[in-house]
Image (cartoon, grey):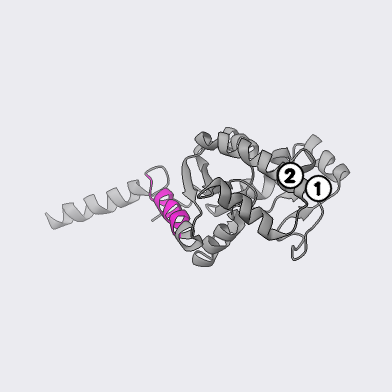
Amino acid sequence: MADSSRGILLVVSGPSGVGKGTVISGLMERYPDVELSVSCTTRQRRQGEADGEDYHFISDNEFEQMRRSGEFLEWAQVHGRHYYGTPREPAEQGLAMGRTLVLEIDYQGAKSVREHLGDQAVLIFVAPPSWQALVERLRKRHTESPQAIAERLASAREEIKNMGIYDYVVVNDEVAEAVQQLSGILLAEQHTTKRFDWRRLRGELLAQADEWG
């Protein structure tokens, strides 16, 4: 009996290499009605990524035009090079229709989304079980140079420093457990009094009580 007028935006952040995408995929397998909010980025598409599914891959000029026209809910420069932004219209439309959306962004974007959407945004930080585990995961990907890994680890420090802005923390030691924790957060949020249609339930129960005598 969730209130269909109260959509949920799960904002998932965490250091590069922590496994955010894998955990989100696990959540979406459990709940097919959960939708991914697709961000725009100016970085190059990686092998296996699909335009419009993983990201909207756009040029620097396109990004700047969208930014100037106010088309982003939030935007940020990541790793000192590439720009990322969340298109405003599809996110706001989805929430207005009561849908559950998942957005994977960094802590800068999470702050901006909270400022714009208030408690419709649920901020979740995915943390590694240890710093060593994060370093090993980045190295095992074999997709970045040593310099790029160093840059990502420097950014990871900033992400971890800002852990306190989030509503929940999920430690991704075992993927299945992390997916279970993220699923639990979604279920809990769906049943808070700000989203659960408790007024309707209260009315039905009291009417039944009156009939019972």
Indicate the position of residue 161 as horizontal and vertical percent values.
57, 34
In this rendering, position of residue 6 left or right of residue 51 = left
The quarter of the rendered structure image containing the C terminus is bottom left
Residue 42 got which mark?
1
Regarding residue 175, the answer to whether it shows in the image is yes
* Mark 2: amino acid: Tyr
Q: Residue at x 72, y 38 (%)?
A: 76
Callout 2 touching callout 1 (CB < 8 Å): yes
Residue found at the very far right of the displayed protein: 61
Magenta region includes residue 73 = no
Which secondary structure type mostly characterizes the magenta part of the structure? helix
In the drawing, what numbered circle is on residue 128?
A: none
Residue 49 vertical placement versus 16 (above, below): below
Residue 15 spot, x, y in % from top left: 61, 46
- Asked where in the image residue 183 lies, by quadrant, the reply is bottom left
Q: Which portion, as a residue range, is magenta?
A: 180-192
Disc 2 to disc 1, how far (Cα)?
7 Å
Label 2, residues with CA under 10 Å away: few <14, some 14-19, many ≥20: many
Q: Secondary structure at mark 1?
A: loop
Q: Residue at x 86, y 43 (%)?
A: 60
- The structure residue drawn at horizontal position 34% and vertical position 50%, both measured from the top left corner, is 200
Q: Return the x and y of residue 12 as percentages of the image width and height.
A: 57, 48
Q: Amino acid at mark 1?
A: Thr
